[in-house]
């Protein structure tokens, strides 16, 4: 998904054919924010229907256990279905249910809803399916899909203002303290996993033979010889990826709580930005400086003189070191062109 980072929700299946009666929500369950969901992989639920026939309507109700802010969902295509619809509610189906989506082409196309606006506050999700016409099976397996959202609902995020009685707002400062402890624990485990992976890769990286010869030698080795080492490296790599995903999830929640408190520092945001974002910013800034340096368009002369005066020797050395040496070809070419222009005047 291209939406802002979100936390996975692990739905709990209430029944294959659930009742539509109102559900009682316990206040003490909402006070406890289940942050353990951030470090758990959501289970893949499958709905097994024994007596499914052509045109049959079946539904299932998922109880998430607590109100959440639903932002994304993913339901894979199923050839046994004619259509699929999703309804949401928080208190009861008769009181506050709303239809979210109807997928009439779920037979061949996957249902993906990304960055839902406005995100609904929901606890119960009802998935209704209709059997495909002409199907000749009485038992089918229907994937329920994956649902994503925010576990902690901040003040003002319930746009309908109908769940104020049950959508409590825990103290963000206390939650940040819990998340900080969780982040430090995951960071320690991630560092140990990375060290283990580096130890396994060191013999390959420090080999004295040439790269081509080393690759040719590895390709000629039998699978039996490669199997133990390959399994260790693959397992260590998957462990690193798992911890990295957990770090990203916890960091995203902490950033969201910090932004709500108004404590976000622009300098810290720039430091914590991802590599792709910094690369795009660097390319755009270099293009802008090149437009100014080569008088592309209307540029006041005073602005050009002020720009030239800022490019002293220390700044040029830093640009050469960080952009001409350590970056990709496009940024190297742009930075060199800019330095030649500035230093030649």
Image (tube, rainbow, N blue to C red):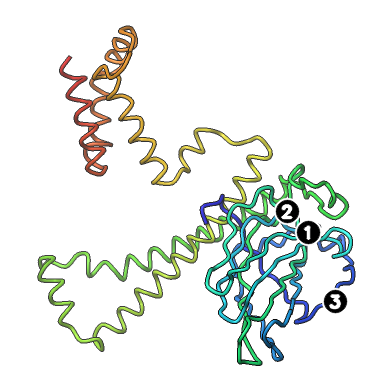
For residue 256, the mark is none
Q: Quadrant of the C terminus?
A: top left
Q: CA distance from mark 1 to mark 2?
A: 10 Å
Q: In the displayed image of the protein, which residue is found farthest to the top?
A: 302
Q: CA distance from mark 3 to mark 2?
A: 22 Å
Query: Disc 1 marks which residue?
Result: 98
Q: CA distance from mark 1 to mark 3?
A: 17 Å
Measuring from the top left, give residue 96's x and y in whole percent.
85, 58
Q: Reading the chain from its start, which is encountered first: label 1 or label 3?
A: 3
For residue 19, the mark is 3
Q: Residues within 10 Å of mark 2 (few under 14, many from 20)?
A: many
Q: Quadrant of residue 85?
A: bottom right
**In the image shown, does 339 or 134 lie closer to the viewer?**
134
**In the image shown, does 104 or 183 lie closer to the viewer?**
104
Q: Is residue 329 above or below residue 100?
A: above
The answer to whether mark 1 and mark 3 are in CB contact below 8 A is no
Query: Disc 2 marks which residue?
Result: 120
Q: Quadrant of residue 37?
A: bottom right
Measuring from the top left, give residue 319's x and y in whole percent.
27, 30
The answer to whether mark 3 and mark 2 are in CB contact below 8 A is no
């Amino acid at each position: 998904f291209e939406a802002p980072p979100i936390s996975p929700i692990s739905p709990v299946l209430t029944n294959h054919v659930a009742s539509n009666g109102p559900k009682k929500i316990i206040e003490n369950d909402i006070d406890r924010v289940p942050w353990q969901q951030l470090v758990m992989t959501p289970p893949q639920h499958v709905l097994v229907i024994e007596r499914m026939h052509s045109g049959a309507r079946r539904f299932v109700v998922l109880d998430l256990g607590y109100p959440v802010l639903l932002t994304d969902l993913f339901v894979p295509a199923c050839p046994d279905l004619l259509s699929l619809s999703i309804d949401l509610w928080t208190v009861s189906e008769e009181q506050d249910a709303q239809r979210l989506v109807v997928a009439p082409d779920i037979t061949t196309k996957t249902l993906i809803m990304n960055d839902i606006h406005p995100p609904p506050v929901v606890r119960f999700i009802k998935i209704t399916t209709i059997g495909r016409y002409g199907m000749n099976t009485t038992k089918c397996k229907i994937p329920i899909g994956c649902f994503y959202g925010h576990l902690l609902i901040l003040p003002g995020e319930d746009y309908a203002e109908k769940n104020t009685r049950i959508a409590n707002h825990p103290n963000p400062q206390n939650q940040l303290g819990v998340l900080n402890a969780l982040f430090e624990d995951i960071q320690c485990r991630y560092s140990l996993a990375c060290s283990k992976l580096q130890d396994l890769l060191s013999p390959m990286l420090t080999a004295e033979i040439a790269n081509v010869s080393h690759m040719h030698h590895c390709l000629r080795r039998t699978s039996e010889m490669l199997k133990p080492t390959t399994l260790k490296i693959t397992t260590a790599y998957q462990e690193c990826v798992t911890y990295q995903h957990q770090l990203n999830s916890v960091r995203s929640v902490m950033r969201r709580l910090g932004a709500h408190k108004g404590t976000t520092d622009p300098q810290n945001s720039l430091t914590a930005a991802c590599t792709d974002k910094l690369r795009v910013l660097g390319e755009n800034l270099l293009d802008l400086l090149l437009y100014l340096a080569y008088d592309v368009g209307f540029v006041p002369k005073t602005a050009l003189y002020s720009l030239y005066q800022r490019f002293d020797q220390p700044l040029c050395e830093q640009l050469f070191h960080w952009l001409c040496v350590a970056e990709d070809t496009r940024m190297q070419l742009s930075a060199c062109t800019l330095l030649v222009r500035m230093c030649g005047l």
